[in-house]
Image: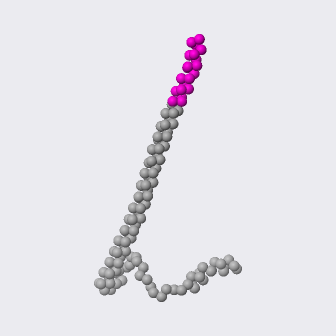
């Protein structure tokens, strides 16, 4: 019983909300063929053109911002890759030097007793 009341509360709240008295002109694509006079049809078409131009501008700006963010991320990743490549190169050089020292060290120990 309580669950039914709880489920119906949002619907009741919507019904009790005050309604606005005036209709608003919501921008969007309108069907202009229903207009009888040429002036109204022309106005309707111009409204559609304006809406589409604003939508295109908004989408273009949004996509440009996404591209800029992606390019910044790519540049940051390039920097990280360069740093990692330098680290790996340094590590390889250090390892090669240590291996060379280890390889040379037993020869020096073996050579010393042979000289006695």
- Percent position of residue 24, x then y: 43, 83
Q: Identify the residue at image location x=57%, y=85%.
A: 16
Give the side of residue 4 with respect to residue 89, left or right. right
Q: Is residue 7 above or below residue 109?
A: below
Q: Quadrant of the N terminus?
A: bottom right
- Percent position of residue 69, x then y: 43, 58
Give the side of residue 39 with respect to residue 98, left or right. left
Q: Nearer the viewer, residue 26 or 101?
A: 101
- Percent position of residue 42, x then y: 30, 81
Q: Nearer the viewer, residue 36 or 61?
A: 61
- Percent position of residue 109, x then y: 58, 19
Q: Identify the residue at image location x=48%, y=88%.
A: 21
Q: Nearer the viewer, residue 81 or 44?
A: 81
- The quarter of the displayed image where residue 112 is located: top right
Q: Is residue 100 above or below residue 52?
A: above
The chief SS type of the magenta part is: helix
Q: Identify the residue at image location x=55%, y=19%.
A: 108
Q: Identify the residue at image location x=51%, y=36%.
A: 91
Q: Quadrant of the C terminus?
A: top right
- The quarter of the displayed image where residue 59 is located: bottom left
Q: Nearer the viewer, residue 35 or 83?
A: 83
Give the side of residue 13 with respect to residue 63, left or right. right
Magenta-highlighted residues: 97-116
Q: Is residue 41 above or below residue 74?
A: below
- In the picture as drawn, the residue positioned furthest to the top comes out as 116
């Amino acid at each position: 019983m309580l669950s039914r009341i709880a489920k119906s509360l949002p619907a009741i709240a919507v019904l009790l909300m005050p309604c606005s008295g005036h209709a608003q002109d919501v921008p969007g694509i309108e069907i202009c063929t229903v207009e009888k006079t040429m002036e109204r049809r022309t106005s309707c078409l111009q409204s559609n053109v304006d809406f589409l131009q604003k939508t295109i501008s908004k989408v273009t700006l949004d996509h440009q911002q996404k591209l800029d963010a992606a390019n910044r991320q790519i540049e940051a990743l390039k920097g990280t890759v360069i740093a990692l490549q330098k680290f790996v190169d340094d590590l390889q050089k250090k390892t090669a030097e240590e291996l060379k020292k280890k390889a040379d060290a037993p020869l020096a120990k073996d050579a010393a007793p042979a000289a006695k």
